[in-house]
Image: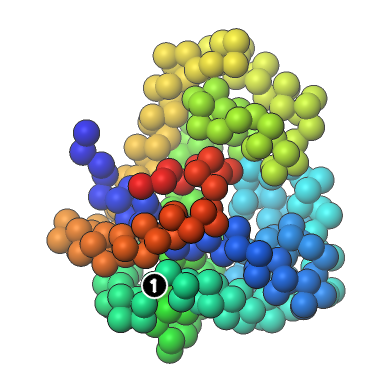
Amino acid sequence: MTIHPARQVWQVVEPLHVVSYFAPSIRDAGIALGLKGYWMTYFAFRAAPLGAVDAATVRATFASFAPSMVDRAIPAAWSRATPQLCLDTRSRVGAEILKEFADPGMCERAVELLADIDLDITGRPLGAANAAIALPADPVAALWQLTATLREHRGDGHIAALVNAGISGREALVLQVAAGRYPVQLIQSVRGWSDAEWAESAEKLTNRGLVRESALTDAGRTILAQVEENTDNAAWSGGLSRLGADGVAELAEILRPAVTKLWASGIIPETNPIGIPKN
C-alpha cells in the first residue's frame, strides 16, 4: 500500500520530537524551573508558544485531555515559570535529548530541507505559534523546533478533520481504542477521563453506529480512515507539498538512522498514547 507523503514525513519527524515527552530529563527540567511534576511541565512547555494562555485555550488546542487534568496545570504554571522561560528550556533540553540520536550534519541538511517550507497557518493556532519562533543557530536545536512546528501543524489539521467528522477529542480516543491502537487503561489514564465520561462517549458512538461492543463497526472504520486521509491531505496541501516527492524521500533517508536508534533505545514505548508506530 502506498503511504501518503505527508504521513512519511510524520513517521520520521514525530518520533524525533516526542522523544522529549518520554525522556526523564524533560520532567527534571520543569521541576528545576519550579513547575510541579511531569504534567504541569508537559502542558506548560507545549503551550508556551501561545503565551500565558488560560486553561480553556489549552483544552481547545490540545483537544483530547480531560478539563480537570488541564485545570490542575494551567494557568498555575505561569506563576511558576514564564512562557519564555519554558520555551528556552524546552529548546535546550529537546536539543540535548535529540543529540543522543542525531548528528549535527544530519540535522543541518534536514533543517535546510524544512526551514524554507511556507506553512499555511490558517486555523492552526499551535502550528502558527511554533512557526513564529525564530530557529536557533544550533542545527540540532533548530531541527527540534522544526519537528515541533510540523507536528503541531499536522495536529491542528487533525483536530479540524475530527471536528468536520463530528467527533470530539474524547470520542476520538474511544474510537482509537476500538480500533485496537492502544489499551483503554493506558489512554484513559494519561488523558484524565473518568469511567463515567468514557462510558458516555462510548454510548454516543454506539448510538451513531460507529462502535459495537467496544469494537469498530464498518462505519467506524470508514470515518476513522477518512479522518486520517483528511489529516494527511491537509498537512500536504498546507505546506509539505513544497518538499515534493524527492524532498520527502531525502528527508526520510536523512532522518531514518536517528529514528531507528531512537526506537532501539526503548525511550518511546512501542504502545504509546501518541499513536506513533514503530518503524
Residue 244, percent from left and from top = 18, 59
Q: Is residue 128 left or right of residue 259?
A: right
Q: Can residue 118 be seen by looking at this rendering? A: yes
Residue 78, percent from left and from top = 79, 72
Q: Secondary structure at mark 1?
A: loop
**Nearer the observer, 75 or 262:** 262
Residue at the limit of the structure toward the bottom, as seen here: 137
Query: Number of callouts in the render?
Result: 1
Q: Is residue 29 left or right of residue 161?
A: right
User: Type of residue at label 1?
Assistant: Ala
**Nearer the observer, 220 or 208:** 220
Q: Can residue 44 be seen by looking at this rendering? A: no
Residue 264, percent from left and from top = 43, 55
Q: Residue at x 38, y 29 (%)?
A: 225
Quarter where residue 182 is shown: top right
Quarter where residue 214 is shown: top right
- Residue 196 vs 129, above or below: the answer is above
The quadrant of the rendering that contains the N terminus is top left
**Nearer the observer, 243 or 123:** 243
Q: Residue at x 78, y 27 (%)?
A: 195
Residue 95, percent from left and from top = 51, 76
Read off the residue under disc 1: 102
- Residue 5 vs 209, above or below: the answer is below
Pointer 1: residues within 10 angstroms few (<14), some, or many (20+)? Answer: many
Q: Residue at x 39, y 22 (%)?
A: 222
